Amino acid sequence: MEERNKSIGKAVNRIDGILKITGKATYATDYPAKNMAYAVIFKSTIAAGTITNLDTTQAEQAKGVLAVITHKNAPKLNQKGGIRGGAMLQSPEILFYGQNIGVVVAETFEQATHAAHLIQVDYQKKDVRTDFEKLAPSATTPSGKELADLIRGDAKGALSTAAVKVEEIYETPIEHHHPMEPHSTIAVWEGDKVILYNGSQIINGAQTAAAQTLNLKPEQVRIVSPFIGGGFGSKGGQWANLILTAVAAKAVNRPVKMALTRQQMFNSVGLRQANIQKISLGATRDGKLISLAHETTTHTAIDNEFLEPCGDCSKIMYEVPNSIISYKVAPMNIILPTYTRGPGKSTGSFALESAMDELAYKLKMDPIELRLKNEPKKDPSNGKPWSSRKTVECLKEGAKAFGWEKRKPAPASNKVGDDLIGYGVACGTYPARQRDSSAIIKLKKTGNNVLATVEIAASDLGTGTNTILAQTAADGLGISLENISVKLGDSDLPPAAGSVGSVGAASFANAVNDACSKITDELLAKSGKQFFVRPTAYQLMVSENISEFQSRVDAKPPKDADQYSAHSFNANFAEVRVNALTGMVKVTRFLAVTGAGKILNPKTARSQIIGGNIWGIGMALSEESVVDPRWGNFATRSFGDYHVPTNLDVGKLDAIFINEDDTIPNKMGVKGIGEVGIVGVAAAIANAIFNATGKRIRKLPITPDKLF
């Protein structure tokens, strides 16, 4: 019988790695289809108003053009079907600059692009709401109940009596997701059914939204998305480009391919909105927090509301008897914001953890000591016990590994040549959850060789989902990893949660693990025998000479999971060098220490963490989408002016995982790491810059002009 070592917990190479590096992995626009046509979106050049004339004559007569679709001839769609951001050609009304106003379909991409430039549009303009700084003072209470003020005790009263206070405003700009693979779709109609090859973080969510919007039944829509070139939240919900590709394919009765350009990504698929956050902390002389207020002002779309929950970290990170978390929102003529990596927590932690550093400085206390002094024994926001919480271990182990004792507390006191050197620390958190997911295991025996196939409508953003599910199945079935095949990314497979909100690994792996247990139980029952030691599915297939067998499970989280507060926690340590002559900042070292339950694969887990860290470095130092308030367009609209970190911008990165056995949120004890990797990073860097220079920068990104 097959002898093998355990796979879970090992740094296994990605099983789909060869496909990717040889170009054989199929992304949304890689699928061949006979007689393919190409679609190009054209967009509004005003931010508010109405289209009064839309002349498509020249475009329709251009070479190769098959159709021009606008609000005049587009089919009636269900605008409440679940597609984000509107812009589905249902009205002449313009709500933001770059709103979709039409689609050209042609024999080639070049012909469609040329024809789009021939369309003439006249507008009746309206006053625009595009200057966030001017609109922020008049922001109002959001309509969503989930972001109603959370009040505990009397925060303002306690602040007035505090011996030491911090009251500051921290600002984060609009950011964009910018996955390597822009949003793109191929639509193929087969009678009254449509196949949509599309990058989707939530396969079944995309299926439902597309079906409802197109006025179809879910079984009439198939989403195919086995490989995704990143998403970071922008492919969590679906946008108008998905639906318009299907509409275009129906109009010309041919398969149609549509891929957004990098420039179109800025106003087509959401963004992280700008946030103005006021943090007020009050403490006793010995560093005990007595008051915390986190007040966020942000913006949303004119016709819909979305807010980042910036106060989420402030709700739970520290023991404080009096607190208030509140939100105000200003509608603007900008595309609807959406979830962006570490939504609310990454931006909110910048404000909270910067303020904690400021409080530590005023108290003349080590920033780590201040955090340890205010460690909560249970979740302060709801009184629930922690399923587990490793913040203390993260801080202590990280301090040792990083060499925190070398930090000089006095700012601007560590200089080497023209470089000022500083150390910073910040904590972060993200909820740990399992969501309903189903999986099928199929076994096939040839001789003494057993092959297993895992089927689940999960998605792999490039994070290693294929690999960790193969590892889970290998251990659960007793079959070698090379004999495991994983099929995912297809709505025809058993439904599953999405790769969003750090629920993917826990949801998918537990579903596969449960399916392995179930199929083994069923094989045992089929054998009719009793064993002293529970055999594996592999052993049963061979001993009972079963050629084929399969089973399905519909996995759910433990019933008592919601009685606890379950989170991943981290501590981030940054070393920076700031050139005293130029103000240029280099993150020379960064260490993330994370408590995230069972680590299924240390190699893919480390990639997730350092990927989040790099984005956090960009958030701290360079990333910013700038709106021209006169017109409402983005002045930054390519990687030439939207700056992301490159290899030369990043020094040594390292990740440590704290051992954590927490089976309360799910049976396998898996917690998410995709989101928490970015939380706290920007604050750690900002705090290090203060330690290096003595200058406290509270508005991101921290560019050289702000340091001067």
Image (spheres, rainbow, N blue to C red):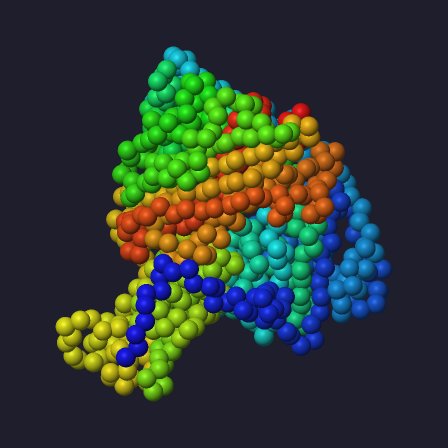
Q: Is residue 236 visible?
A: yes
Q: Quadrant of residue 602 in the image? A: bottom left
- Percent across and percent down for residue 389 are 32, 40
In front: 73, or 190?
190
**Residue drawn 52% across and 53% down?**
236
From this view, report whether residue 151 is shown above or below residue 362.
below
**Horizontal placement of 672 versus 168: left or right?**
left
- Percent across and percent down for residue 395 are 38, 36
Q: Is residue 703 visible?
A: no
**Residue drawn 35% across and 46% down?**
658
**Residue drawn 69% across and 47% down?**
639
In front: 352, or 705?
705
Looking at the rendered image, the quarter that the C terminus falls into is top right
- Percent across and percent down for residue 494 are 41, 67
Looking at the rendered image, the quarter that the N terminus falls into is bottom left
Q: Quadrant of residue 329 in the image? A: top right
- Percent across and percent down for residue 172 are 57, 33
**Horizontal placement of 420 versus 315: left or right?**
right
In front: 320, or 124?
320
